[in-house]
Image (cartoon, rainbow, N blue to C red):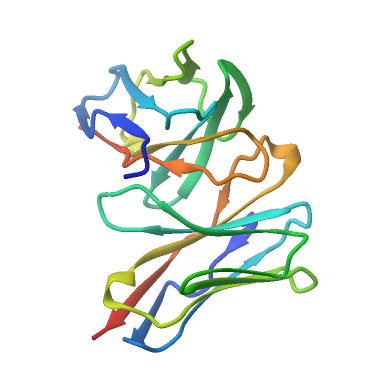
Amino acid sequence: DSGVTQTPKHLITATGQRVTLRCSPRSGDLSVYWYQQSLDQGLQFLIQYYNGEERAKGNILERFSAQQFPDLHSELNLSSLELGDSALYFCASSVGDRYQPQHFGDGTRLSIL
Amino acid sequence: DQQVKQNSPSLSVQEGRISILNCDYTNSMFDYFLWYKKYPAEGPTFLISISSIKDKNEDGRFTVFLNKSAKHLSLHIVPSQPGDSAVYFCAATFSGSARQLTFGSGTQLTVLP
């Protein structure tokens, strides 16, 4: 158990819809990272928050957004969903942003029908 | 452009023998490298890391070697156990990237009893 909690584990929805994925980091971790794992792209970095502030953006679509709340949990919002958004979405957390490993949750599997 | 490459999609090893997983990178700015293990339906689990100021780091049965001049790192597992069967991901990051991880495509390790 990494200590990182992601909900829900599975989401099935339709094209055009909007979903919210939730992540609770390990106790004491200030950084939260979101990654997408799709069959053809592997694990790709989406966005990072540190203590409530956005720190870095990767290959995140404009239809996607995220935030980190004062209690340090984070949400990833995906809107106007397309078939190609079907993937595993992982959240990871770390204490800070230096030489420290990131610890991953078990992911949310999003299926778009 | 794949900045982190794992050229072997799969590797089979006999129980008790050494497993060697390889990873190459192209970005000379990377200064921190990590190995993760992933079982189906779970998130990546952190195994071991190494910073660029070292060339070796050991943790129990796991040793990571870094050859900066060749931009190559390897993970040695000795002795290999059936429970080590999983997908292994190499990842890299650098200080100017807010520590986002760039992952390789993974190597499926199968340890045969």
Q: Is residue B85 visible?
A: no
Of the 4 image quadrants, the one containing the N terminus of chain B is bottom right
Locate residue B98, reporting x and y percent.
Answer: 67, 34
- What percent of the width, then of the height, locates residue A101? 55, 46
Q: In this view, does A73 lie above or below B65?
A: above
Q: Can residue B58 be seen in this view?
A: yes
Residue A31 or residue A112, whichever sits in front: A31
B74 horizontally vs A26: left or right: right
Quarter of the image with the C terminus of chain B is bottom left
**Residue B96 at x, y = what percent?**
75, 38
Whole-percent x, y for residue A29 in the image: 51, 30
> Within the image, what quadrant is residue B110 found in?
bottom left
Q: In this view, does A108 lie to the left or right of B37?
A: left
How many marks can you see?
0
Q: Which residue lies furthest to the front in this view?
A: B60
Between A22 and A44, the residue placed more toward the observer is A22
Asked if residue A89 is positioned above or below residue A22 in the image, the reply reads below
Going 31% across and 17% down the picture, which residue do you hit?
A18
Q: In this view, does B9 lie to the left or right of A111?
A: right
- The structure residue drawn at horizontal position 24% and vertical position 28%, both measured from the top left corner, is A8
Q: In which quarter of the image is residue A107?
A: top left
Placement of B85 over or under A39, stated as above or below = below
Specify the farthest residue to the top: A70
* B108 sits left or right of A46 in the view: left
Q: Which of B49 and B42 is in front in this view?
A: B49
Residue depicted at x 28% and y 71%: B83
